[in-house]
Amino acid sequence: MKRNEANEPVASAVRLELPPQAVSIAVARAVIRRIVTFRDDDAQSSFLVAFTEIAANAIDEHERIGSAEPICVEVRSGSIDLVSVVDSGEGLQVESPLESGPSAPKNASERGRGLALAYAFIDRMEIDSTTDGTTVRLPLTGIGLVR
């Protein structure tokens, strides 16, 4: 049986390597809708809003640094079903969800609210960020199951 980076068993996974372009978000959303059974329409909508914000942040980072490297989206079933978004940007300063969570960042303009919005919908979201990139894990616990 396959294992993930935390050495947990992974029953199945779908991995997409997508160009850092806005159309990639629509492609990934279509795949997620196809292989995840959501609890209800509200859960699906909430999850997809959070996913869209995280994927858009990854694409924005690649555009900012001029990277053509793909954005990776992985949908996994296992001990915890989840969707991960991985970029190869320069990293992200991440505060704890309690500090940066659902409220908008201080002095936020029209941009910069994506993480706060994603945390509002997926409060158990995990972010690992280094100078080599960022991985965001969106657990499906209580929201849906990978088929």
Image (tube, helix red, strand yellow):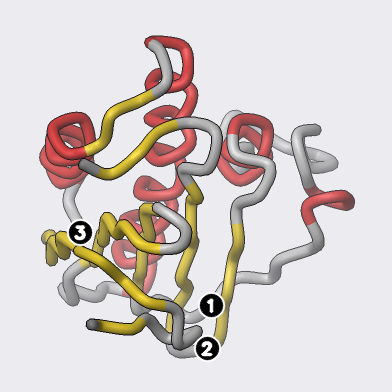
Q: Quadrant of the C terminus?
A: top left
Q: Is residue 3 above or below residue 101?
A: below
The vertical placement of 122 against 55, above or below, is: above
Q: Earlier in the sequence, mark 1 or mark 3?
A: 3
In the image: residue 140, left or right of residue 103? left
| Residue identifier under label 2 | 131
Q: Residues within 10 Å of mark 2 (few under 14, many from 20)?
A: few
Residue at 60 percent across and 39 percent down: it is: 122
Q: Determine whether, in the image, residue 38 is placed left or right of residue 26.
A: right
Residue contact between numbered discs 2 and 1, judged by CB atoms under 8 Å:
yes
**Disc 3/disc 2 C-alpha distance (Å):** 18 Å
Disc 1: which residue: 91
- Residues 40 and 26: in front is 40
The mark found on residue 77 in the picture is none
Q: Residue at x 60, y 30 (%)?
A: 121
Residue 76 or residue 32, whichever sits in front: 76
Please, what is the three-letter code of the amino acid marked with disc 2?
A: Thr
Look at 27% across and 55% down and name the residue there: 75
Q: Find disc 3 in the rendering and name its residue.
A: 20
Regarding mark 3 in the picture, which secondary structure is present there? loop
Q: Which residue type does callout 3 highlight?
A: Pro
Q: Residue 38, located in which quarter of the rendered image? A: top left
Q: CA distance from mark 2 to mark 1?
A: 5 Å
Give the structural element (helix, strand or loop) at label 1: loop
Other residues around mark 1 within 10 Å, as few (<14) / some (14–19) / many (≥20): some
Residue furthest right in the image: 99
Residue type at mark 1: give it: Gly
